[in-house]
Amino acid sequence: MTNETLERTPSQSERALSGIRELLFSGVFTPGARLSEPAIAERLQLSRTPVRAALARLEQEGAVDAIPSGGFSVRKFATDDILDTIELRGVLEGTAARLAAERGIAPAHSMAFRKLLSKIDMLLKETGAKLDHDTYTACNAAFHDLVKESCGSSVIAREIDRLTALPFASPNALLMVQRDLPEFHGSLVLAQSQHRAIVEAIELREGSRAEALAREHARLARRNLDVAMNDDRIKARFPALTLVTA
């Protein structure tokens, strides 16, 4: 792999996709508002072609709605739909953990799990403002990626990727908006204990236990959503929650 590949700058399509996602969940647009391709293109300093393609991709992902007369609008998300998506992610990640346990994982994967667990342990020694939230978020995402990769199934990995691209469905969804709450650090400690139990079950080849633990772990995201939707402090800091309806 060349340095040029490693340092590749995002394409216009990638910039359009990530830029529109960020706009959608930063409170720039109100629920139901029509999305103007020229305005978005100007805002992101891109041509209209990648913006149009990105909006079509986001419609396929369920992040925006297609308007019958043409164009796209900001979607509202039903709480039950989000919960169903999180539940389905738990099913798929549980299946990935079970297969990883039944098939056995490579020493490199086991080592990667151990390094991540140790790194998260070190991070969680700090609390409140001293906790490195960005690094924790990256480590949490890496853990879930390892579970996905360890099962050795490209089909399951692809479906997990598809689900986690949906709004509010990823393992880190709504995680950081809770960081000022007193109970936030305790929820991270609980998540870490579940991480460790999942890895232990995988390494001991306990498929059913690994599956159950991974499914239970995914339900932390359901708890995060419930907390967020019932806390005015979180809503004030996280404008994307205005897109969620009961």
Image: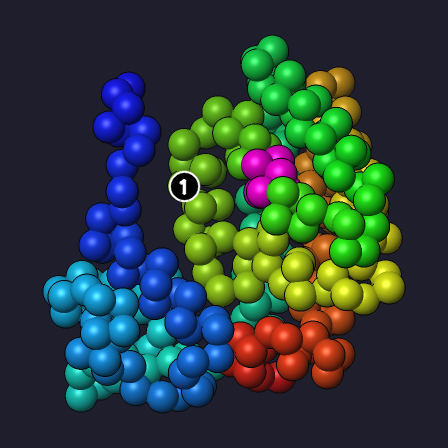
**Amino acid type, label 1:** Arg
Q: Report the residue that reaches farthest toward the top.
A: 107
Above or below for 89 versus 59: above
- Membership of 139 in magenta stretch: yes
Above or below for 163 versus 2: below
Range drawn in magenta? 138-144
Above or below for 141 versus 241: above
- Membership of 22 in magenta stretch: no
| Residue topped by disc 1 | 158
**Image coordinates for residue 61, horizontal then vertical, percent:** 37, 62
**Image coordinates for residue 220, horizontal then vertical, percent:** 73, 55
Instruction: Out of 198 and 238, give the one closest to the viewer.
Output: 238
Instruction: Out of 187 and 198, give the one closest to the viewer.
Output: 187
In the shown orientation, is residue 82 left or right of residue 159?
A: right
In the shown orientation, is residue 106 left or right of residue 5?
A: right
Give the structural element (helix, strand or loop) at label 1: helix
